Image: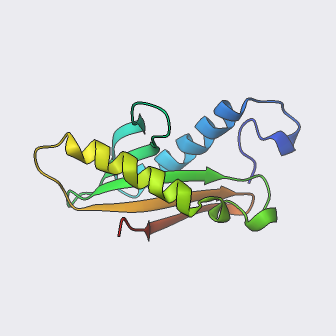
Amino acid sequence: MVFPHDRTAGASASTKSVGDAAEDAALRHLQQAGLRLVQRNYRTPGRGGGEIDLIMRTADGTTVFVEVRRRASASHGGAGASISATKQRRIIFAARHYLMRLSVTPPCRFDVVLLEPQGLQWLPAAFDAG
């Protein structure tokens, strides 16, 4: 699978544009699966906070916090291996920050979408806040 602006395809591109293209592909996939976009690139204020690539909602009302990871090769463990415990803590921190703004806390889960040369892989409930 070649992604738009993929460095391995010979095109030069910024890290942001490559990341945006990966998020776009993940968003299309999740929407085709019936999820609805609530917010994109939610960030907590201040340094050391967290960011959530996509906040989605399922038909049953579950809020889904989605981390999108893209890697041009599977070396070094691929895209999945890049989601460290520290990265998970930052995502969980940002999710809690987001949920504090709501009057009622919905059911939630943390999904991961991996984009690698062999294709897109969606991992529902990839990790939890526990």
Judging depth in this view, the residue of 25 and 77 nearest the camera is: 77
Where residue 4 sits in the image (x, y, percent)?
71, 38
Q: Quadrant of the N terminus?
A: bottom right
When asked about the image quadrant of residue 60, the answer is: bottom left
Rendered residue at 42%/35% (across/down)? 43
125 up-or-down from 15: above or below: below
Count of all numbered marks drawn on residues in the image: 0
Determine the residue located farthest toward the left in the rendered image: 103
Where residue 81 sits in the image (x, y, percent)?
66, 65
Left or right: 45 as drawn, with respect to 118: left
Residue 118 shows in the view: yes
Left or right: 96 as drawn, with respect to 52: left
Where residue 31 sits in the image (x, y, percent)?
40, 50
Q: Which colour scheme is used?
A: rainbow
Rendered residue at 70%/34% (across/down)? 15
When asked about the image quadrant of residue 77, the answer is: bottom right
109 up-or-down from 72: above or below: below
Determine the residue located farthest toward the right in the rendered image: 10
Determine the residue located farthest toward the front in the rendered image: 47
Left or right: 82 as drawn, with respect to 109: right
Where residue 110 sits in the image (x, y, percent)?
40, 61
Judging depth in this view, the residue of 31 and 129 nearest the camera is: 129
127 up-or-down from 71: above or below: below
Residue 66 shows in the view: no
Rendered residue at 70%/58% (across/down)? 116
